[in-house]
Image (cartoon, rainbow, N blue to C red):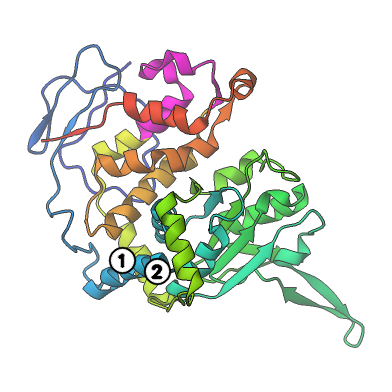
Amino acid sequence: MDDVSIPEDSAPVSRQVPASTDPSVPERGQHLGAGTVPEEPGRPGAPREYPEASGHPDELAPPDPDLARDDVSALRAAGQQVRTVVVGQEAMVDRLLIATLARGHCLLEGVPGVAKTLAVRTFAVVLGGSFARLQFTPDLVPSDIIGTRIYKPSTESFDVELGPVFVNFVLADEVNRAPAKVQAAMLELMAEHQVSLGGVSYQLPDPFTVIATQNPLESEGVYPLPEAQRDRFLLKVDVPLPRAHEEAEILRRMSVRPPIPEPVLDPERVVRLQRAADEVYVHPLITDYAVRLVMATRSPQEYGLPGLAPIISGGASPRATLGLVAAARAMALIQGRDHVLPEDLQVLAVDVIAHRLLLGFDAVADGINARDIVGEVVHTVPPPRPS
């Protein structure tokens, strides 16, 4: 492969990840700011050095100068407020915050009774936005979600009645129980944040996040989501059953007075936080690392993973690369950093990439888990090193 030249005066990247997907390693000794970019012999996509950004992970250092320090503090307080109601499920609460700050959508999968719906209801209350719960059933039709045009004989004209999705937070409960027409209706509003009725587009409010829940495919009466719709979800989070001490705490809380969540944020502050997440610094080599992680699912043999080639029939789309960087920015902001670390990508890669993979028939028959595949990719593809 040809070498990739990285300019010395690299600027912070925008939300759009560079189109280059060449994972080759620059020549030994090529300069990048204060550090060098060495080549590690014998390993594809070898790690590279990057100048370590200023700031400490534990410091509240919002990158937007107009962002008040208490907005970031309130963001953390929002997570704690959700945890006063939802016992355990730390990863689920964190991912809900990340999806909202990254302007994405989140898919929660778990057996019934693991607090998926409770967590989403609580989350909407804490963030102070409007909320709608949609129970997906086999007899649901698109107009039940997005709205419809109603003919008025008195005026001989059509009035538009907007559906319940015109809120800040939509809970699509048991989303994989609805028919294909309803799933198709979800695509536009999730991707474009708008609804089209009668040739007119209606913008959804800002912020807008769809949080869907689904039961595992082994459950009765559920269907796999279409590939295009899965790709619209920034994150897919597996929600496990509670551990013994967590279940004891659930029993203790619910046997007295169930905690009532209180609003901590409001839509305006959430939008400010989203803009602050956009400004979190991503070094070009961190961006390159995100590209290599996703490219390894498309051409695993080029990244030292020849065993995955017959398992993966379709790798992750460019939305995975964009989503991985956006989610990492949100995670950095939540942790009070003004820059993204390789560890952010490593922590989020499974939840961002796994649900977008298409596995071959043999892999499905053998019960191979896409999350394990992404975990192997993260373990094998080397990250850049701080100089």
Q: Position of residue 121 (x, y in %)?
A: 54, 68
Residue found at the far top of this picture: 42
Name the amino acid, label 2: Thr
Binning the other alpha carbons within 10 Å of mark 1 as few (below 14), some (14 to 19) or many (20 upward) gives some
Viewed as shown, does residue 162 lie left or right of 358? right
Viewed as shown, does residue 316 lie left or right of 19? right
Q: Nearer the viewer, residue 320 or 79?
A: 79
Q: Residue at x 21, y 69 (%)?
A: 65
Q: Which mark is residue 387?
A: none
Marks 1 & 2, CB-CB < 8 Å contact: no
Residue found at the far left of this picture: 34
Q: Residue at x 74, y 44 (%)?
A: 220
Name the amino acid, label 1: Arg
Viewed as shown, does residue 184 lie left or right of 121? right
Q: Position of residue 24 (x, y in %)?
A: 30, 21
| Residue 27 lies in the magenta stretch | no
Q: Which residue is mark 1?
A: 76
| First to last magenta residue range | 291-314
Q: Is residue 96 visible?
A: no
Q: Residue at x 38, y 43 (%)?
A: 348
| Residue 299 lies in the magenta stretch | yes
Q: Position of residue 308 (x, y in %)?
A: 47, 18
